Amino acid sequence: MKKVVVVTGAARGIGLATSKKFLAEGWQVIMIDIDGAVQTTARNSLDADDLTLAIECDVSEPEQVTLAVEEGLARFGRIDALVNNAGIAVFKPVVETSFEEWSRVLAVNLNGPFICTQACVPAMMANGGGSIVNITSISGTRASMLRVAYGTSKAALMHLTKQQAAELGNHGIRVNAVSPGPVDTAMAKEVHTADIRADYHDAIPLNRYGTEEELAEAVYFLSSDKASYINGHTLNVDGGFAATGIGLPSIRTT
């Protein structure tokens, strides 16, 4: 029987690239996204109706996630991997970030992986194990401008990864994280001005942004049997950025 992966935030960007990678490797894919219309279009573009299922769902809402997982199990009968990719960001100074914005970012970026993991783990246990990959960010390792909610949520997600790995490893479920550096996603293209991109290029040893496909390769590796003894690890996929950091001087004030 073909293996099954649940990918959240699958309508675009890293999530869609990850869905394509798993399909290419012969998996069945349950695509979850809050933007149902865009996700349906994305799924149709994959031309793999028998191997995919698109479900509109807010990952910060436990009841919605429970129903989504039940629908996925009814369709495919098993879950072998979960990729917690869904995330949002608010780029504002600390004093201008509202509590509502702060709360929403943490609800999606931190509560979401917690909720989705709880929902998927019983099915993995029934299969004798599985893999979970949380998508964090270099912003969870190195502080930067305008990322008080986003960076904090991703730092917390890195530690959640360790907590999950420590407990779920006893049930044959490995939990790891992929930490992207700057990636040419739609969100990055929207908020990264030319001078910000130049600053990043100066600080990344490979002197370029990553691609969504490069992130998908790392996610798939950690989900595969080739990573069978990797657990509780955060893998930086960042062109060396974590080794150097960046201060974004173009938006600093004195």
Image (cartoon, rainbow, N blue to C red):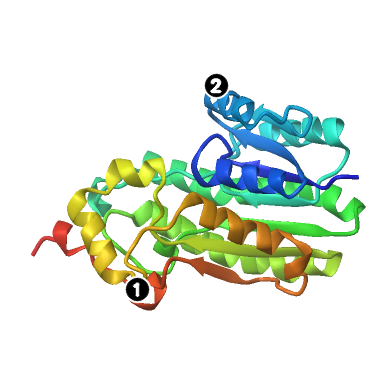
Q: Is residue 90 visible?
A: no
Asked whether 44 or 187 is in front, the reply is: 44
Which image quarter is the C terminus in? bottom left
SS class, disc 2 = helix
Residue 177 in the image: above or below residue 108 = below
Outermost residue, bottom direction?
243
Amino acid type, label 2 = Ala
Which residue occupies 71% across, 59% down? 223
Marker disc for residue 205: 1
Classify 10 Å Cα crowding around label 2: few (below 14), some (14-19), many (20 and above). Answer: few
Q: Is residue 186 left or right of residue 27?
A: left
Picture quadrant of residue 249: bottom left
Residue 228 vs residue 113: left or right? right
Q: Quadrant of the N terminus?
A: top right
Q: Amino acid at mark 1?
A: Pro
Residue 117, x across and y down, in percent: 70, 51
Measuring 53% from the left and 56% from the top, which residue is drawn there?
Answer: 215
Q: Secondary structure at mark 1?
A: loop
Residue for point 73% across, 27% down: 49
Expressed as whole percent of the image width and height from the top left, the position of residue 93 reads: 24, 51
- First along the sequence among labels 1 and 2: 2
Residue reaching furthest left? Answer: 254
Q: Which residue lies under the disc numbered 2?
A: 37
The x, y position of residue 73, in whole percent, is: 83, 36
The alpha-carbon separation of the residues under discs 1 and 2 comes to 38 Å
Residue 70 percent across, percent down from the top left? 80, 33
Whether residue 57 is situated above or below residue 180 in the rendered picture: above
Left or right: 136 as drawn, with respect to 162:
left
